[in-house]
Image (cartoon, grey):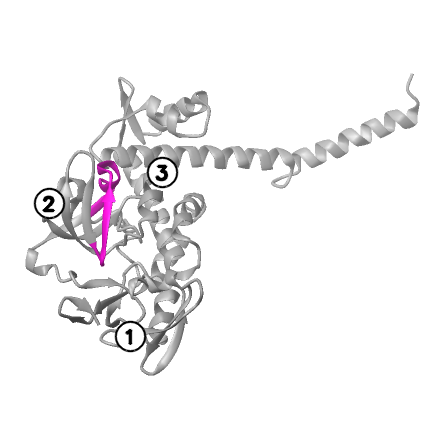
């Protein structure tokens, strides 16, 4: 038989473990329950977003589409879908899922947080834009309605996120994007980029690599089943139709296309002269204010003063002052080169 001391120790250990496990609100049981609750909430919200985006693009969302796209077991996803049907968020018919009014309202609240947070990241932080989406995916499940409204007010209640997606209002109102995919227009069309879709990520990364920006003017040079060729800000771009399809442009009249001589400061060569005609809308917040404070303002003459051995950074002469910036910043500054006899001077 065990000695009384060992029995007492076992009993005390059991009491201690019970205390640690079931202590109100702070015990392991409650923490695990909270984690599970938050996990279920996150899964529900992710499913609502998936269905909303599918409906918004004119397609149906099937149950197998959900199970294939979310990092959860099919059993758990099906259980969540069943609970969402019972709660009146969604309805299903032959495996096809559809949002009910309460589900759509809930989805718009999550999308509102996501897009506001992306706007915050673009204007108030130094995070790279390739990270905005993933960071917003985390925060969209954490902010309360009160915190969301406070965030919106601090940003000036913006109507669009940095990708050009409309931000729902607190009451669920949402503007429509006025434009069509770049891949749907014929050659010689001119327009302005108004939206860049950030999903799927593999296509978004290809667009990022091209340094294409919201607000840029484009002129389509060639379009066929294999490639879309277009001109923008002094450069020629070649994209596969599936990639160009994630770029939305608003068509302009040909006489409105005024950027034939527009290029980026990063393309300026030693000995060339130019004048600044603006700063890309892609440059926001502190970065934009810093460039303006340094003197990169409209109609200012500019030329290269000095180059580093790697040509990055470069020093530009502005109003008799030499200012060095990196090419990553210079690409946001739009210029018009001085032209004489068809050549930049």
Task: From the image, state whether disc 3 or disc 1 is nearer to you.
Answer: 1
Residue 312 position within the rendered picture, expressed as x and y whole percent measured from the top left: 42, 63
Which residue does the numbered mark 1 point to in the structure image? Answer: 302
| Residue closest to the eye, 58 or 251 | 251
SS under mark 2? loop
Which of the numbered marks, if any, corresponds to residue 202?
3
Q: CA distance from mark 2 to mark 1?
A: 34 Å
Q: Is residue 34 magenta?
A: no
Residue drawn at x 17%, y 33% is 225
**Contact flag, marks 2 and 1 (Cβ < 8 Å):** no
The range drawn in magenta is 232-248
Q: CA distance from mark 3 to mark 1?
A: 37 Å
Residue 19 position within the rendered picture, expressed as x and y whole percent measured from the top left: 71, 35
The answer to whether residue 66 is above or below residue 251 is: above
| Residue closest to the eye, 97 or 127 | 127
Which of the numbered marks, if any, corresponds to residue 187?
2
Q: Earlier in the sequence, mark 2 or mark 1?
A: 2
Residue 74 position within the rendered picture, expressed as x and y whole percent measured from the top left: 43, 21
Q: Earlier in the sequence, mark 3 or mark 2?
A: 2
Q: Earlier in the sequence, mark 3 or mark 1?
A: 3
Which quarter of the figure has residue 279?
bottom left
State whether residue 173 appears in this view: no
State whether residue 328 appears in this view: yes
Residue drawn at x 9%, y 49% is 188
Q: Residues within 10 Å of mark 1 (few under 14, many from 20)?
A: many
**Contact flag, marks 3 and 2 (Cβ < 8 Å):** no
């Amino acid at each position: 038989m065990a000695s009384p001391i060992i029995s007492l120790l076992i009993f005390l250990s059991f009491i201690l473990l019970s205390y640690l496990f079931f202590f109100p609100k702070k015990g392991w049981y409650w923490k695990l329950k909270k984690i599970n609750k938050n996990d279920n909430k996150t899964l529900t919200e992710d499913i609502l977003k998936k269905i909303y985006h599918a409906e918004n693009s004119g397609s149906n969302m099937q149950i197998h589409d959900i199970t294939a796209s979310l990092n959860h077991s099919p059993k758990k996803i099906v259980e969540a879908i069943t609970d969402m049907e019972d709660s009146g968020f969604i309805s299903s018919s032959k495996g096809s899922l559809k949002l009910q009014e309460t589900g759509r309202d809930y989805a718009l609240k999550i999308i509102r947080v996501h897009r506001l947070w992306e706007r915050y990241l673009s204007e108030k932080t130094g995070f790279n834009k390739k990270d905005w989406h993933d960071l917003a995916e985390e925060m969209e499940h954490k902010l309360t309605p009160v915190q969301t409204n406070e965030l919106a007010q601090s940003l000036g209640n913006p109507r669009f996120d940095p990708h050009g997606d409309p931000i729902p209002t607190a009451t669920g109102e949402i503007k429509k994007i006025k434009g069509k995919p770049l891949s749907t227009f014929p050659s010689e069309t001119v327009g302005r980029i108004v939206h860049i879709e950030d999903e799927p990520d593999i296509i978004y990364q290809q667009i990022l690599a091209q340094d294409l920006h919201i607000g840029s003017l484009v002129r389509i040079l060639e379009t066929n089943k294999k490639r879309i060729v277009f001109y923008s800000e002094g450069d020629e771009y070649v994209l596969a139709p599936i990639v160009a399809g994630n770029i939305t442009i608003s068509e302009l009249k040909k006489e409105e296309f005024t950027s034939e001589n527009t290029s980026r400061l990063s393309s300026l060569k030693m000995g060339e002269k130019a004048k600044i005609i603006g700063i890309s809308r892609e440059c926001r917040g502190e970065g934009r204010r810093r460039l303006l404070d340094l003197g990169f303002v409209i109609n200012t003459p500019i030329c290269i003063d000095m180059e580093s051995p790697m040509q990055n950074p470069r020093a530009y002469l502005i109003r008799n002052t030499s200012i060095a910036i990196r090419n990553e910043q210079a690409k946001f500054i739009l210029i018009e080169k001085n032209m004489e006899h068809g050549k930049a001077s």
